[in-house]
Image (spheres, rainbow, N blue to C red):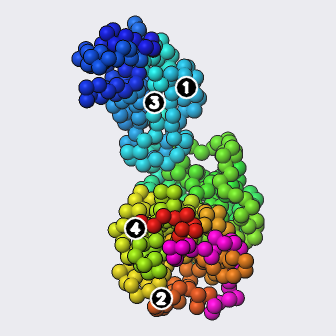
Amino acid sequence: MRFGPVPVAESAGLITAHSLRSGGETLRKGSIITPAMAATLEADGVCEVVAVSLETGDVGEDAAAGRLAAILSGENLRVEEPFTGRCNLFATTRGILLIDRGRIDSVNGVDEAVTVATLPAFKPVTEGEMVATVKIIPYAVGSATLARACAEGEAGAIAVAPYRRRRVGVVSTRLASLKDATIDKTLRVLAERLAPTGAEIIAETRVPHTAEGVASGLAEVIDAAGADLTVVFGASAVIDENDVVPAAIRAAGGLVEHLGMPVDPGNLLLLGRIGERIVLGAPGCARSSRENGFDWILNRILADLQVTREELTRLGVGGLLMEIASRPHPREGVDAEDHTSRVDVVVLAAGRSSRMEGPNKLLATFEGTPLVRRSVMTALGSRAGRVHVVTGHMRAQIEAALAGLDVAFVENDAFADGLSTSLAAGFDAASGEADGVLVMLADQPLLTPADLDSLIDAFRAAGEGSIVLAADEGRRANPVILASSFRPEIAALEGDVGARGIVQAHLDLVRAVELGAAASFDVDTPELMERAGGILR
């Protein structure tokens, strides 16, 4: 392939290196220069163009990308028609992405003109999701180079393993310190994990935290119900191969294949087998909906992929999934193990901005971004779970300002009756699945995701039933996190009031986190908006 300036008179039939515009016509880069376009360019006084001419044996970018993609594509993938030197691969079923890392590295090492990029190996993918792309960098590649790349790739270096295991049983052990509500929540979280895979919980039982109790539970869900995967949630974490859960697996005639893995959270996972049926001893973090090592192994097993001791021990690089310092020590008991209790966010964005005397302050822009979008993005950037946005006044405009963000909208038709109505509506929507609800005003532009994470960490450390609020030099401010158990008291609020009265009534449960000025600064007036750098429409 030759690349460089060419006289316009000699350019017909060559490939444009840059877009060309002449006589009201545009020829995009990578297109063939027609004789008519060459004549038009020459008539416009253009002397030369930068163009590409193919040599004998060169393969055009689209043909090359398509050929290599077809070689790499394995089971359950669809190869899209190539364009501009790119050919994308899409999953045709939900499952786990399989990548032959060595082959992909070899292809990418053949020549800088040939590149293959993929999603991470073993990532859960959905039907229709793009999983890889082949890109030819120049406009063509030599046939010998393409042949070497295809030889290195061979057939099926990329594939999707569909989910095959569908029947999941659960055995939960009981101790006096473990509440049934915790077990109920654990089952809900597991069901949510299983839903994208098509698997479901077909049987669950709750037994004493003894080897005999667990062995009985395993027999109930495996032999009687026919589960092909059983998850055991122990009231106390498994820390030794002679502990309750591994002892029960052996008592049931099974084998403990491995205990522990270098993924955190998820260290205390146990992998066992009773005949052809797999048993997973879940780590404490599996009670949380947050991604942890349990997800990695669960999804592979549901796709019927072999998981060996050797594979588990190779997960250490990339296995640190969250900041250790923010979490309690793993042996502080069941409640401490459930350190990632879920905190959802409610952003209150239904008000009328009455002190602005006209404009809606939430649509003011900060460096081109509407204030409400900036606030919601702060919430999405934190370690919180779902973000709920309460809308009312100018609902359509507020929702339009949040287009494309992963939020749940809560419509409050009674917003004119005061703040309490928005608080109650948002809290009701968020508290059903969350342990705590972070109530956030949408007009605090100084807040950062790290500020919200500080509140969330304090709530998790404070435990069930607590209240955590932000402070500015010791003065109580916003946001605030209230345990979901306060839902009845929130629902009973009336008028233009927030949760101040509830906080005052439960001072013994309150923990303050110093955030400084970010906690008390809002933009209620045009003067404050200008001071913060916002531009009102």
- Name the residue carrying label 3: 134
Q: Which residues are magenta?
A: 504-528
Question: Which residue is more in the foreground, 144 or 319?
Answer: 144
Question: Is residue 510 a member of the stretch shown in magenta?
Answer: yes
Query: Disc 4 to disc 1, how far (Cα)?
Result: 46 Å
Nearest the camera: 210 or 436?
Answer: 436
Task: Give me the residue at 52% from left, 46% from top.
Answer: 123
Residue 104's quadrant in the figure? top right
Residue 473 visible, this angle: yes
Q: Measuring 46% from the left and 36% from the top, which residue is drawn there? A: 132
Name the residue tied to disc 4: 398
The residue identified by callout 2 is: 496
Residue on which disc 1 sits: 108
Label 2 SS: loop
Sort mark 4 into few (<14), some (14-19) or many (20+) by Cα contacts within 10 Å. Answer: many
- Check disc 3: other Cα within 10 Å, few if <14, some if 14-19, many if 20+: many
Q: Earlier in the sequence, mark 1 or mark 2?
A: 1
What residue type is disc 1 on?
Answer: Asn
Residue 167 in sight in this render: no
| Disc nearest the viewer among 2 and 3 | 2
- The kind of residue tagged 3 is Val
Among numbered discs 2 and 3, the one appearing first in the sequence:
3
Q: Amino acid at mark 4?
A: Ile
**Which quadrant of the structure image shows residue 18?**
top left
The front one of 268 and 480 is 480
Label whose residue precedes the other's in the sequence (4 or 3): 3
Q: Regarding mark 3 in the picture, which secondary structure is present there?
A: strand
Earlier-in-chain disc, 2 versus 4: 4
* Left or right of residue 325, residue 202 in this image: left
Measured Cα–Cα span from mark 2 to mark 4: 21 Å
